[in-house]
Image (cartoon, helix red, strand yellow):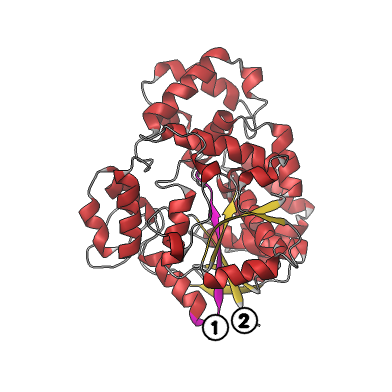
Amino acid sequence: MREVIGITAEYNPFHNGHLYMLREAKAKFSDAAVIIILSSNFTQRGEPAICDKFARAETALAGGADLVLELPFIFSCAAAQDFSAGAIDILAKTKLASHIAFGLENINYANLDALINLLLQEPENFKNNLKLNLKLGMSYTRALSRAADQIIPGSEEFLLQPNNMLAISYLKRIKERNYNLKTLFIPRTGAAHNFNNLNFNLNFASSSALRTAIKDNKLELLNNYMPESSIKILTQAIAQGRACINANKKLWLILQSIFLRSSPSELSNFDLINNGLENLFINNFKNFNNLDEFIDKCVSLRYTRSHIRRCLMRILIGVSKRDALELRDTGAGYARVLGFSETGRELLKIARGRSDIKLITRLAAAKTNLCAKYEFTAENFYELLLDNNNNLNYALQQRPVSPVNFGR
């Protein structure tokens, strides 16, 4: 039986660093297959992806992936803990993967196991420190890192490095649920994930820098940093009006209309809206002409830009606190296939005989599922943000992509 490696990703867009990681993971074994758990149309930062999930699934398959499964909106547009839990649950419950591969900045970090146990057990002194740090106005990530550091010195520096918080969240979920997944640590290469400049002496660039180049219509700059297949799929999406490049104006108009008709108490029913955020939003939205200025006003030591954007997306999609709490407990409850290679087709045949969750190719097959309900809303909302938004049922009509239907 071949080894099957799982990777969680956004591929927003798929670039040389992603290609490197995929190849490095495959190189660990002589005949490995790779499953990608791919973010839906909205990302961890609380932003719409440049291309829809089917186009990004196509870039993954062109880069060597074998099977692409969707990480639904509820988990893809979420902080590290929920993002990782949703992804790991889907990967583990399909019972296909033997390993999971992810980036780690310090693969020889000595206190890794101790740190995971601390976050799982949450002893009283840790919880007290976390509460105190939050009261001091720190963001949750900073407060947690500082609380861990007060018990395991060096934890804060480790956790605040790119990739490491997400890596710890993966490892924590695996141990918490006793999943049979071995780990493969892949050291980062190239630019840091939030480094916004392109370095022409390297063949690697951050996704942030590439998105900036795309939004500035400087597509010629992509050639050094993205596989040819990825650039081709991206340019095709742009030509078809299916690239979500400048959505902020539309998002701001919709948010303003929601704030105009909502009271603070109504906003507080949405997931993540607490500790006075509802008042902050209602009291300030009339003072700004665009979304970026409004978000700048809302950002603080406690609330990062990504957190504010995720809050706004929860409001836009209408995610209630009650439903979010339920989904954090139950998980997605299905695995939607976005694309597959010939090897991936064989994996699907195997999965149908052993998976603990239903594998679907159309969202309609999970129409009674709560997670699918929000995914359907998010899909339609994404379509509204595109220049070519004539078909709100686009995602519902799409079949999984595969090498035989590339260039659709």
The image's mark for residue 31 is 1
Secondary structure under badge 2? loop
Name, please, the residue furthest toward the bottom: 30
The image's mark for residue 52 is none
**Residue 30 belongs to the span the image colors magenta:** yes
Mark 1 Cα within 10 Å, few/some/many (few <14, many 20+)?
Answer: few
Residue 78 vs 308, above or below: the answer is below
Q: Position of residue 46 (x, y in %)?
A: 50, 41
Q: Residue at x 61, y 18 (%)?
A: 264
Q: Position of residue 276 (x, y in %)?
A: 61, 25
Which residue is disc 2 drawn over? 2
Part of the protein shown in magenta = 27-41
Secondary structure under badge 1? loop
Report the Cα–Cα distance between label 2 and label 1.
Answer: 6 Å
Is disc 2 in contact with disc 1, using a CB cutoff of under 8 Å? yes
Q: Position of residue 108 (x, y in %)?
A: 55, 76
Quadrant, the N terminus = bottom right
**Residue 123 belongs to the span the image colors magenta:** no
* In front of the other: 88 or 295: 88
Residue 85 falls left or right of residue 253? right
Residue 114 falls left or right of residue 211? right
Q: Amino acid at mark 2?
A: Arg
